[in-house]
Image: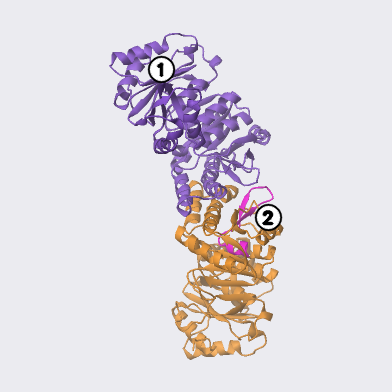
Chain colours: A purple, B orange
Amino acid sequence: MARIVMKFGGTSVADLERIRNAAARVMRAVEAGDEVAVVVSAMAGATNQLVDWCHELSPLYDAREYDAVVATGEQVTVGLFAIALQTLGVEARSWTGWQIPVSTDGQHGKARIMAIDGAELIRRMQAGQVPVIAGFQGLGPDKRITTLGRGGSDTSAVAVAAAIRADRCDIYTDVDGIYTTDPRLVSKARKLSHITYEEMLELASVGAKVLQTRSVELAMKERVRVQVLSSFTDTPGTLVVDEDEIVEQEIVAGIAYSRDEAKLTVRRVPDRPGVAAAVFGPLAENGINVDMIVQNVSEDGTTDMTFTLNKTELPRARAVLEAMRGEIGYADLAADSDVAKISVVGVGMRSHAGVAGTMFKALAGRGINIQVISTSEIKVSVLIAAEYTELAVRALHTAYGLDVA
Amino acid sequence: MARIVMKFGGTSVADLERIRNAAARVMRAVEAGDEVAVVVSAMAGATNQLVDWCHELSPLYDAREYDAVVATGEQVTVGLFAIALQTLGVEARSWTGWQIPVSTDGQHGKARIMAIDGAELIRRMQAGQVPVIAGFQGLGPDKRITTLGRGGSDTSAVAVAAAIRADRCDIYTDVDGIYTTDPRLVSKARKLSHITYEEMLELASVGAKVLQTRSVELAMKERVRVQVLSSFTDTPGTLVVDEDEIVEQEIVAGIAYSRDEAKLTVRRVPDRPGVAAAVFGPLAENGINVDMIVQNVSEDGTTDMTFTLNKTELPRARAVLEAMRGEIGYADLAADSDVAKISVVGVGMRSHAGVAGTMFKALAGRGINIQVISTSEIKVSVLIAAEYTELAVRALHTAYGLDVA
């Protein structure tokens, strides 16, 4: 017997038929002797409709009212899901965020969960009742409904799992697990049976959109074992767990790519102390996130600073830097949106040398030029011309021995 | 300056454009110096969709879950309405039933309001904020969401008006007031400027579906002045008020009709004490509401008992009585669904004789046979063949001097 959280995303509860199927899955777990708490998203499409209405009324809508409107999506699902469970003979009741309560901070529209008292939920689960909990929502200090921001239901599920000390948090979604790379790109991509929190975080932040980053951070902090699996098949998914749980750790867990970035080069900046601050300070003040940064070796007292940022931020970043031109004293700006970031991720890198070398060699072997390199403890990322994306990912997938046999 | 509740029904908030229009109406009232609280229904159609989903999942759904699902309709409207008001520069915030709270009893799906603490609402209104309150919902003793049953938003509005001691409760709907009779039937129908609670109750219960009966009962009990008016025009509506407020009371306020009833005659029942209980006891036990009842004069120790009931209940009533045939000892049952009930309503009847006589004479003059008669202090109802409905209503409308000049 285990205590598990089963979380169903929007596509898994998109209509009554899918809600019935998801409920049947819960029933089987209950019949197998598990204690189950369910966390659900809004029916696919429902949230978009509600968000659109708010936007249409006012682009500058009151986030507190937005929360009241948008949180109804999950409230509908929990009620319907509880009815579906009851129809299958499973004792169940719905819980909104304010009923538990899921206490959050006061940042309406992007609240953070502060506390969930799991005692009542545990008591009911032990008495045989399945709590069906609205994801994505909570109660703010102002006693008004808050939402956690898009994708927040994964975070809700992990937080509930921590609060009820669940053995596992199963995230049902429309993919059946975490792959070594995007299966749409690489036919030889392999589903991982395990992945560490750290690797999942790196993969999530570089483009693998299966789990919301915040939910993985929370899982890592609270040591919640998370399983990503499909609500449409019965195959086991991928377990996201602590490094200690993985006996035979591979050096590289996966290859991720992102085409969402652009490269901006500030050319011929005076090479003197404080110039990096002069460039990146104004960008930060304007809320523009910068990712990879490289600075060339100085020549005749000037240097080039290159960095990447989200493509959508490029016009704003240019405007900010152009306004600062006199102050920074650079020659000109060069932008390139036609780039892709390819990342190799794996906790095994900590103890194995040569991971980056394998990468550079594999790319060179295909004639792919590396524009920018950045590394972290468990990740090596390179920026290349976008047209080589598929070629690079496939080459690396083979080079690290990740291809299915 | 007045303190008013403005209640908008589903058709008045059916889409964003109508929400904007309704909000503009509130803005004009605020600008004129009124303190306004808004009560809203779900957007037209929303509730039906939610109810359908519950029914589809299970005809025997858990009413507590039904409430959680269905109450979201009004929650969406209050958030959107508050945003619409803010966009017009009117300070506003939304309130769900549980936030105020609107305390109800525990009858999920058809709860009754027990208490509303208006202090916080009044404080905010005096500070210039417009509360936008979800109608139709409350919080049960189990701390779960309750709904008041279909049409309950009118009742919410009147209850809020009582709680905040409002000068008036304006119910915006798709008709522009209460008419002397159905204007679709009688082109000379006249809009009433005033009507008493008692008359409104009698008219509501005999087929004029403008206001929900419970809301009128509550308004009468709490002495809340109610105005029924259209959200699509700017003409004044009809005030539903205490009798004392109406200076020149007409004898007859209106003529109502209903084609929803059927007539059932139990023929040749033994005319002995307790026989009425033997007939109507089993019907009541089976939840079948009986309306008009007449008993013929006894002949040779037997009598005929005739009563009316809702057409949809006719098959069940027949089945109940047929099962009791041996016990009651009647000859046979005769049913007639082809009937209409015509009612003349007016508090003036209390002090004026001859109202019933005028009715019988007018009907006789058109050759219309009266099948059953029933009277109350302020109402005379007759059952006639359905084919004469229009003729009868028009004749009575003229006979009581109600036609527009």
Question: Could you tell whether A12 is left or right of A259 in the image?
Answer: right
Residue A264 appears in the rendering = yes
Q: Of residues B127 and A134, which is closer to you in this image? A: B127
Residue bearing the label numbered 2: B105
> Residue A246 placed where, x, y %?
51, 15
State the CA–CA distance, disc 2 to disc 1. 76 Å
Q: Position of residue B154 (x, y in %)?
A: 59, 64
Taking depth in this image into account, of B105 and A343 the one nearest to the observer is A343
Type of amino acid at the residue the image marks with label 1: Val
Q: Is the residue marked by circle 1 packed among few (<14), some (14-19), or many (20+) residues within 10 Å?
A: few
Q: Which residues are magenta?
A: B134-157
Q: Is residue B304 left or right of residue A249?
A: right
Chain of the residue that carries numbered disc 1 in the rendered image: A
Q: Which residue is mark 1?
A: A297
> How many numbered marks appear?
2
The front one of B265 and B163 is B163
Examine the image and state in which quarter residue B391 appears: bottom left
Q: Is residue B231 above or below residue B114?
A: below
x, y percentage for residue A101?
64, 40
Q: Position of residue B199 (x, y in %)?
A: 61, 77
Name the quarter where the N terminus of chain B is drawn.
Answer: bottom right
